[in-house]
Image: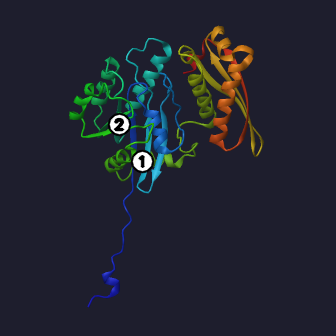
Amino acid sequence: MKSERQDKKIPTAPIKKEGTVLLIGRPNVGKSTFLNTLIGRKVAITSPKPQTTRSPIKAMYEDERGTIVFTDTPGIFGKAEDKLSKKINSKTLLTVKENVDVVIYMVDQSRKRDFEEGKVLGIVRKIDKPKILVINKVDLEAKFLPQYKFLEDEFDHVFYISALQDKHIKPLTDKIFELLPEKNDTVEYYKSLKPVYPLLNMDSRTFIAELIREKVFLGMGEEIPYTTTAVIDEIIERTPKLTYIKARILTTEDRYKRMIIGSKGRKIKELGSWARKEIALATGKKIYLDLTVETDPHWVEMY
């Protein structure tokens, strides 16, 4: 007769996975929205305009299954004619060359496939790693979906999602974990850092500047966002609950500066109030935001 101890099976802990995932696609397919939705907080700014994401963003996602380090790349521009677009493309191409475990190639079924898409697909085809095709924006009319259907034959794994409405994100995440290795030295390195969790390659000043830039993108017209950036000059913890932030919006011409300030300063007050509320939400502190606008035709050189 077996003892009670022999009959009882000792449960084994599930093997945790950890690895790196590259998010790639043309501008505005929804990569940043997907990352924000999955992680459950804003790590990347979003807007309907190209050039929203200007530098690769690394962010960490963890649950009981393990750890994923995502790299959200700026969208690849098919024709990079201005200096900023050229720099954005250059940063993305350098990021693509980093060692990754899984590649997510995201497309937007609501937009016509064009030369720009072909350029991104050519880059993806050269990456010899497990690849997932993600067709985003299923919440919108799929009038251009037939133009992307042929891609399903090139990828072993295909998912239809709505990053904005959090549809079908879980099955995609399950597949990512399935494809990841059990141990990854790169992930261990990132775990050893003390980032602005879950962001891994962005300090608090840069993150706050990004939030301000997002408000300019969302609050201004079509032309201005391309010519602007934001910089943080000072962050002072005046009390445990109050933070003072001195920031500037930089733009390339005086006419844009006047537009951002607005009649009697109304527009800059509106943008500042909008940014202040989001910074307060992100930091959990009361924020005093001292926001001004300057003309600097050479700010692009910072990138």
Which numbered dot is residue 34? none
Gap in angstroms between the C-alphas marked 1 and 2? 21 Å
Coloration mode:
rainbow
Q: How many marks?
A: 2
Q: Residues within 10 Å of mark 2 (few under 14, many from 20)?
A: many
Q: Is residue 112 left or right of residue 252?
A: left
| Residue 268 vertical position relative to residue 193 in the rendered view, above or below | above
Q: Which residue is mark 1?
A: 185
Pick out the residue farthest to the front: 141
Taking depth in this image into account, of 164 and 180 the one nearest to the observer is 164
| Residue 44 vertical position relative to residue 300 in the rendered view, above or below | below
Q: Residues within 10 Å of mark 1 (few under 14, many from 20)?
A: few
Write down the quadrant of residue 115 in the picture: top left
Q: Position of residue 17 (x, y in %)?
A: 38, 53
Write down the quadrant of residue 287 in the picture: top right
Q: Secondary structure at mark 1?
A: helix
Q: Position of residue 86 (x, y in %)?
A: 45, 17
**Residue shown at 45%/36% (left/top)?**
164
Which numbered dot is residue 104? 2
Q: Is residue 114 left or right of residue 211?
A: left
Q: Position of residue 180 (x, y in %)?
A: 34, 48
Pick out the residue farthest to the bottom: 1
Quadrant location, the C terminus:
top right
